[in-house]
Amino acid sequence: MNNALLITKYYLKRAFSRPLDVALMTLLPVGIIVVNVMLNMNIINLGGGDTGDMYFQGFNIEATVLTMFILVMFQTMSGVYAGEFVFTDFRDVNKWRRRALPVPSWSFTFAAVAASVLFSFATAVFILVVMHFGFSIYLGNWFIVLPLVFLVGLWAQFIGIIVAMFVSKKSVIDGVTIILGFVLSSLSGTFLIAVPIPAVVRDFVIPTGVAVRGIVSTNIITTVEGGVSWMWGDTMTDSLMAIGIMVAHVIVAAIVAVVLMRRKVS
């Protein structure tokens, strides 16, 4: 375990030492959110929208919803980090060096996943803090928001490893994970084109949809005709169910990743 923790520290250093990657996971999503919020505020101020007042009790509801949606999408894409680490150290330039070390393979796998999910989670918290102080987003129940964000990031790391087992170039991992994030977000109706699929599939099967439903079910206030209510319900049931479903997604992805690594990494 000491070896795994030491390698985790090494992977974290690699992740945070690339300014472009840090910017893509922090500044880019913040920029997308800010642009969309400013555009929507202008539309409302000009009287061209039908969403009404963007603020409730001092919280910017439009910014809150956009932040949660885009945050989940970028967490889905974060699997590129674990995928690249595993590809480099198990299938590419560093595989012979790794084999020469007196360290079991599981230590590298554990470290790659741990470092990647910590990196993605740190960027997510950064986005939430910036948007809270910059645009007064409603952070909601931390015991729901943070576990779901963490679980989406953890699921994405195992997906990144799975992708890494099927590609021949590290650069392909970037493209596949980014496309996957866009597709899943579109299927869950949170970004780009909302694909018409059954609600049960969107909210209980697709990971991005599960996470978004769990977060907004009891944690995002929205204005509706006749007053104020919670989106999709007023209890914690949907949120707790979403956490359970995401745990199941993580377990399945982890099992698949481990099985593939044992078969494909000689």
Image (cartoon, rainbow, N blue to C red):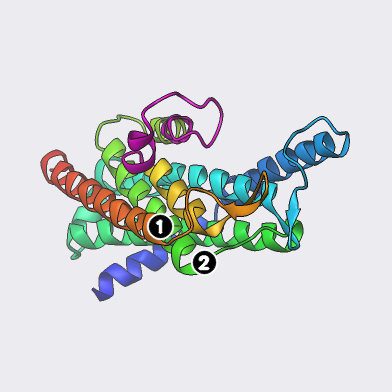
Classify mark 2: helix, strand or loop: loop
Q: Is residue 190 visible?
A: yes
Q: Which tag, 1 or 2, sits closer to the chain's start?
A: 2
Classify mark 1: helix, strand or loop: helix
Estimate the spatial distance between the alpha carbons at disc 1 and disc 2, rounded to whole Å. 10 Å
| Disc 1 packing (10 Å; few <14; some 14–19; many ≥20) | many
Name the kind of residue labelled 2 in the image: Asn
- The one nearer the camera, 123 or 167, is 123
In which quadrant of the rendered view does residue 139 lie? bottom right
Q: Residue at x 35, y 31 (%)?
A: 169
| Disc 2 packing (10 Å; few <14; some 14–19; many ≥20) | few
Q: Are marks 1 and 2 in contact (CB under 8 Å)?
A: yes
Q: Which residues are magenta?
A: 180-206
- The one nearer the camera, 153 or 138, is 138
Q: Is residue 220 left or right of residue 6?
A: right
In which quadrant of the rendered view does residue 147 lie? bottom left
Which disc, if any, is residue 239?
1
Q: Residue at x 41, y 52 (%)?
A: 153
Q: Spot the residue most to the front.
A: 226
Quadrant location, the N terminus? bottom left
Residue 43 position within the rendered picture, expressed as x and y whole percent measured from the top left = 81, 34
Q: Disc 2 marks which residue?
A: 141
- The one nearer the camera, 93 or 89, is 89
